[in-house]
Image (cartoon, rainbow, N blue to C red):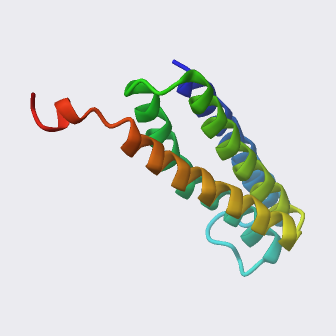
Amino acid sequence: MISVIYAVIAAALIIFLSFKVIKTRRRLQISVGDGNNEDLQTVQGAQSNAIEYLPIALLLLFYLEYNGANIWLIHLAGITLMTGRIVHARGLLQKNLKRRVLGMQITIYALIGLCLLNIAYLPLDKLLGR
């Protein structure tokens, strides 16, 4: 299962971002909410953005593999997706708008590609109940 590799990388990214939130909360002594603190809002934003995009993207990646796509397409989609997510998270954490936008663009292109590839590899016989 190739898609598991990218699920593990995604989980590692979420864990990393979660630790950033925990570290920032401890440093600022804010246990609930964001205390209207920009640093905490930034790390929470990076974490929540990853959590918003990764589940559907990983599901699409899994189905692409499940439906028999070529191995290189699965890796290309997984690498593109994770590159976008990592570039976006770094851009957000470093307050680098250009990197953040680039990461989001890469992510969106990966999602569009995954959607189109899943349609192309959709097993019509199963869909029609044959």
Q: Quadrant of the C terminus?
A: top left
In the figure, 53 relative to 37: above or below?
Answer: above
Q: Position of residue 79 (x, y in %)?
A: 70, 37
- Residue at horizontal 69%, vertical 63%? 105
Q: Position of residue 124 (x, y in %)?
A: 23, 36
Q: Position of residue 15 (x, y in %)?
A: 68, 41
Choose between 91 and 33: the one closer to the eye: 91
Work out which residue is located at the far left of the displayed protein and give it: 130
Q: Is residue 74 left or right of residue 123?
A: right
Choose between 40 and 71: the one closer to the eye: 71
| Quadrant of residue 66 within the rendered picture | top left
Q: Is residue 22 left or right of residue 107?
A: right
Work out which residue is located at the far bottom of the displayed protein and give it: 36
In the figure, 33 relative to 17: above or below?
Answer: below
Choose between 17 and 57: the one closer to the eye: 57
- Residue at horizontal 82%, vertical 70%? 39
